[in-house]
Amino acid sequence: MPTPDLEERFRRWLKLIAEMHDGANFTANESIAWTPLRKPLAECSVALVSTAGVHLKSQPAHDLLNPHGDASFREIPGDTQTRNLAVDHIHYDTTDANKDPNCVFPLDRLRELVSIGMIGAIAPMHYGFMGFIPDGRLLRDTTAPLVAERLLAQGTDVVVLTPG
Amino acid sequence: MCHQSVGLLQGAIEHRGIPSISITVRPEITAHANVSRACYVRFPTGNPIGEPNKPEQQRIILTGVLEQLIEIKEPGTIVELPFRWRRM
C-alpha cells in the first residue's frame, strides 16, 4: 500500500513527533507476525484492544501529562455498559467518543454481532490503552506481551484493534 | 502515535498466536508498522468506527472489518474500506 504520497506524509509525521516529543522513537514490529484464522467467525470469541484512552469510569484515567506517555492498560469486562466508560486522551478530539464510546470501542456493536450469530462470543475481558507512548519500545517490551498473554489465556480467538 | 501503539500491540498479539485485524485512519503510519491485517477508513481521528449514536453505520463498519479477517490472505495487507465521512 505505500505510495509516494503516503511516504511523504509519513516523513512529515516522523519530523513532527521528533520536534514535539523528547525521546520520541518510532517503533515498528521487526517483522510481520501472522496467525491464520483457524475457525469460522461464528465460532470465535472476539476481544477489543484500543489505544483511544478507554477506561471504566471507576478506573483511573491514563496519565495524560507524562511526556514519556503511559503504557499501562485497563481491563474492561465484556458485559460493561457503555455508559460506564470514559475516554481520555489529549492528542485527538474525544468529544464524539465520550458521547458514544462505540466510536472507538464498539462493545455494543460486538454484542449485536453475537446476537445475530456473526461472531460466536464476546471475550470476557477487553483492553484499553492510551496510545500516546512516544518511545514505542516501552510498550513493546512491557505491557504489549503481557496483554497478549492474557488474551490468549482467556481463550480469545480474534482481536480487533482500534486507534484513537 | 495511537497507530504506532496499535501496531506494536497487534504484533505482540499475532506473535502469541491470535489472529487480529486493526483499523487505521493514518495509513501512512500503519504502512510502516508491520502489522498482519489492517482496514483503512477515511475517517477523522477519534472516529475509527464512525459517528456517535449511529449504531447502524458503526455495525456496517465493524462487520466490514471482521470480513477482512477472512478475505486477507497476505501478511501485511492494508485494505481500504469504501466508507466516506459525511457528517450531517
Image (cartoon, rainbow, N blue to C red):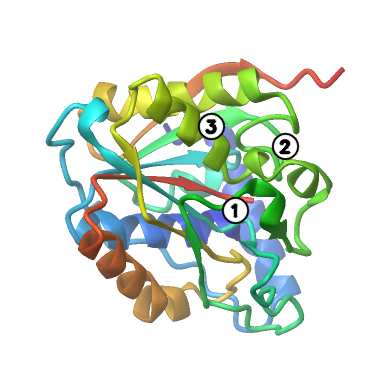
Q: Which residue is disc 3 drawn over? A: A109
Task: Please name which of the two marks, 1 or 3, marks the residue nearer to the observer.
Answer: 3
Residue that sits furthest to the left in the current view = A38
- The answer to whether A12 is drawn above or below residue B75 in the figure is below
- The answer to whether A114 is drawn above or below residue B31 in the figure is above
User: What SS does tag 1 mark?
Assistant: helix
The disc numbered 2 marks a residue on which chain? Answer: B
Q: x and y percent of residue B68 in the render?
A: 34, 25
For disc 3, the neighbor class at 10 Å (few under 14, some 14 to 19, many from 20) is many
Q: Which residue is disc 2 drawn over? A: B44
| Residue under the point 84% across and 47% down | A95
For disc 1, the neighbor class at 10 Å (few under 14, some 14 to 19, many from 20) is few
Q: x and y percent of residue A131 in the render?
A: 59, 64
Quarter in which the N terminus of chain A is drawn? top left
How far apart marks 2 and 1 lie (CA) works out to 20 Å
* Type of amino acid at the residue the image marks with label 2: Pro
Q: x and y percent of residue A34 in the render?
A: 20, 47
Q: Which residue is disc 1 drawn over? A: A11
| Residue under the point 62% across and 37% down | B48
Depth check, front residue: A61 or A23: A61
Contact, CB < 8 Å: mark 2 with mark 3? no
Q: x and y percent of residue A149 in the render?
A: 25, 69
Examine the rendering and report whether any part of residue A112 can be seen: yes
Depth check, front residue: B52 or A139: B52
* Type of amino acid at the residue the image marks with label 1: Arg
* Type of amino acid at the residue the image marks with label 3: Arg
The disc numbered 1 marks a residue on which chain? Answer: A
How far apart marks 2 and 3 lie (CA) works out to 20 Å
Same subunit: marks 1 and 3:
yes
